[in-house]
Amino acid sequence: MGRADRPSTLILIRSRKIAFDVPTAKALNDLTTYSKPARYLGILPLMKALIVYQHSNLCYILAKLAKSIASFYRRLIMAIPESARMLESENTTEPEDGDVHHLYNEEASLDDHLHDHKGDVDFARTQKLLYISHFLSTWNSRAFEFGAFLFLANIFPQTLLPASVYAMSRALFAVLLSSATGYAVDRVAVGLSSLLLLSMQKLPSVKQSSSISLWLLCPLCLLAGMEKLGSVLNTIAVERDWVVVIANGDDDRLTKLNSQMRRIDLFCKLVAPLAISFLDVASTQLAIVATAGMSCISVPIEYLTIAKVYHTVPSLSDPKQVTAARQTHWLQSLLNTWLKGLSAYVRHPVFLPSFALALLYMTVLSFSGQMITYLLAIGVSSGAIGILRGIAALSELSATWLAPLLMARIGPIRAGIWFLNWELLCVILACIFFWLPIAEPTLLAAGTVSAVIASRVGLWGYDLSAQILVQDEIEPDMRGTFSSQEFALQNGFEMLAFLSTIIFSRPEQFKYPATISAVAVAVAGVLYAAFVRTRRGHLVHLSRCLDGAHRKKPGWTAITQDEGDEEHELPALGPV
């Protein structure tokens, strides 16, 4: 009797009835019952796929092979003494001849396996597309962010005013509009990203105009604000929202996505400014054309990849519920929310560490626009600045390894004051070089830049320590409000730093904004010291200091104390 003449059995799989002959069905039944050897051979997943897609011929052959393996496995099990058998009863029960339906009516097992496999394939494809889009977006953003200041310094070589106004406009757009437009990110993120890249393409033509009067700063600042707003919205959409949706509740996937996105950010932060600076050494016009060209070329690639991600993950197209009142009165609601959150922020026990961190943003002693313009004005080449910025980024990266080690040893509170004191020391040294009568610009730049690079370890080390304190002590329902207030203060102090270089706009006056930056770090240190004194009851172990100073003196006897008394932290004070 041929296979076509054999009696068939209807099996319900994925809501479809599929006909299999009885020997094949029984072999599949044996396969599922004794699935361990088949799983070892990799037959089980293949069989499930063949069942769903109705490849009956291959299914029949593999089922016979699997039945032979199952029979051998069963005989092997039966040869083991009863007392040594550790198999579950459901896996050692021989199915009856006519019982071939109960295993295949469990559709969830097959569906889950195939769905998981398809989900893994889709996730791998989606993450590659996401990485491509994120790399292009981040590369262009970092290159333009660094290159714009080089181009401005080339156009206005003897003043810090244009670069300061430009930077302040970008920050002002972020403070005023990012919160207001954040709710609409699902509708306008791709459009604003395209507009951002178009702005980056058009901006060089503005800067190469024959007229370089200061009134050209108006359209330049407008485009800079649009670029900054697009960057903020892209961060909110992709890094804060899309990544979570793509991970679909899988912590491992979310960790993998976040880690890779951070690696892309770091790579672009290191390499993109370096590439632009080397092009600028050869020709500023070449660097401008390259910046515009990269942006223009990446637009279709970035759009197609991000659109593919959008259509591959259906959850991304789910609309957010936004009320009409929120759309109409967003400014009033934003102001009321900010004022209410400000009161809660100031009264919180970890207000001082957070406020001290925000104060550190009021600085010109970093490789931002003001210092880049200053270094160019005193004769440092753009290529050297690119290399120095890369070294500073590596210094910041080292803090991400050093800070966890130090916090694990002495705790985040003490680690914070150590890092903050280190930054204060380095910033003071940098300021000293500005006030010394040094005629050689190279020596002045070397001393200042070395101190600034060293200070980045303290800045980011304190940043990590303060964030640990905030994350540990902020209530879950308060995290969003607290973080938004902290973000607003950071941008506010950053704008004050830009304002200082607007007032003191000549390169020879840069020592005044630098001194203001050092004072801000000192104030942050005092505020954090007050917090440490409140929490620990002391700043230093006086008993240890006295013990070390007088241990060898005649008549001095050290009084031992319990180990638990050495580190005494007071409980956090409640809101006033």
Image: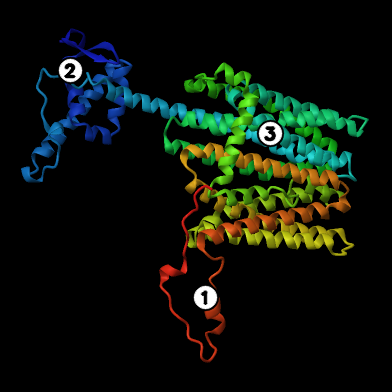
The residue carrying mark 3 is 174
> In terms of image quadrants, where is residue 336?
top right
**In the rendered structure, which disc, 3 or 2, sits on the residue that comes first in sequence?**
2
Q: Which residue, as the protein is rendered here, is positioned at the far top? A: 5
- The answer to whether residue 483 is left or right of residue 76 is right
Query: Number of callouts in the render?
Result: 3
- The answer to whether residue 182 is left or right of residue 374 is left
Could you tell me which secondary element the residue under label 2 belongs to? loop
Image coords of residue 475 (percent x, y): 47, 42
Q: Which mark is residue 544?
A: 1
What kind of residue is marked 2?
His
**In the rendered structure, which disc, 2 or 1, sits on the residue that comes first in sequence?**
2
Q: Which mark is residue 101?
A: 2
Q: Nearer the viewer, mark 3 or mark 2?
A: 3
Residues under labels 3 and 2: Cα distance? 63 Å
Whether residue 81 is visible here, answered yes or no, is: yes
